[in-house]
Amino acid sequence: MQLKKTSVIEQPVYKQSLAELLVFLVLTVAAVVNASTSVFYVLYFFWWSELLRLVADRLFYKRNAQALYTANDLLPLWSSLFILFIHVVFIVVLFGFIANWNNKELLALNIRVLLFKNQFFNVNLLFVVLQRVYMHLQQQPVKVVFGGFTPNMIILHISIIFGGILQFFVVKRFPHFFTPDNLWGSALLLLPFLLLKTGLYIRNKAVQ
């Protein structure tokens, strides 16, 4: 079966998606190199980026004549917010504190992220929200999806599962290899998230 090519009108959307992906990759790698990231950093970033996307879409999609709106259930926005609330409690408690309770450096890093005192995290989030608003104001054919199982929500679900498995069954079992003094632990934990983010972009590009 031959795949359809991306239409001319949708090309700006994919350019914006590629820009978002590249900014995320660059800032995440920079954060790893500067020892300013953790699995909590990435999960919390995914959570905030999805919340900001929902808010921006809710405020601006009616002003965007090209927006492609779909709903997954009868109360799409509220169901999204409810699931996000469950996620953030799980992410903050488990990955922000419990997983790193004995590692003062990672715990302090997570607290800085939680309080928006991590420059890589803040810049990335700012780019996400400004880009989404810009796409609506430019009347680009943005896909607006509310509900509990949007593509970004699915990434968040999978990321939490992978993050938990790697954190508790790999990194913690080999403390002599994954030490606070090297980047191997951060690199291992971040790899699935980077692959998921890249894979989602490639999938969205291919199905058009």
Image (cartoon, helix red, strand yellow):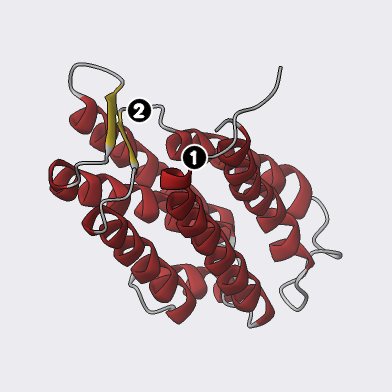
Mark 1 to mark 2 CA distance (whole Å): 28 Å
Considering the numbered disc 1 on the image, is that residue within a helix, a strand or a loop? loop
Q: Earlier in the sequence, mark 1 or mark 2?
A: 1
Asked whether 185 or 23 is in front, the reply is 23
**Residue 40 in sight here:** no
**Residue 28 in sight here:** yes
Identified at 27% across, 40% down, the residue is 67
Quarter of the picture holding the N terminus: top right
Q: Is residue 156 left or right of residue 125?
A: right
Q: Say what amino acid the circle numbered 1 marks.
A: Ser
Label disc, if present, on residue 188 of the rendered structure: none
Label disc, if present, on residue 7 of the rendered structure: 1
Identified at 54% across, 39% down, the residue is 6
Label 1 packing within 10 angstroms: few (<14), some (14-19), many (20+): few
Q: Position of residue 152 (x, y in %)?
A: 45, 40
Q: Say what amino acid the circle numbered 2 marks.
A: Gly
Q: Position of residue 8 (x, y in %)?
A: 47, 46
117 versus 71 height, above or below: below
The residue lying furthest to the front in this view is 8
Quarter of the picture holding the C terminus: top right
Asked whether 193 or 117 is in front, the reply is 193
Label 2 packing within 10 angstroms: few (<14), some (14-19), many (20+): many
Asked whether 141 or 162 is in front, the reply is 141
Considering the numbered disc 2 on the image, is that residue within a helix, a strand or a loop? loop
Total marks in image: 2
Q: Position of residue 15 (x, y in %)?
A: 51, 57
160 versus 75 height, above or below: below
Residue tagged 2 = 148
Q: Position of residue 48 (x, y in %)?
A: 36, 55
Locate residue 119: give its quadrant.
Answer: bottom left
Q: Is residue 171 left or right of residue 199?
A: right
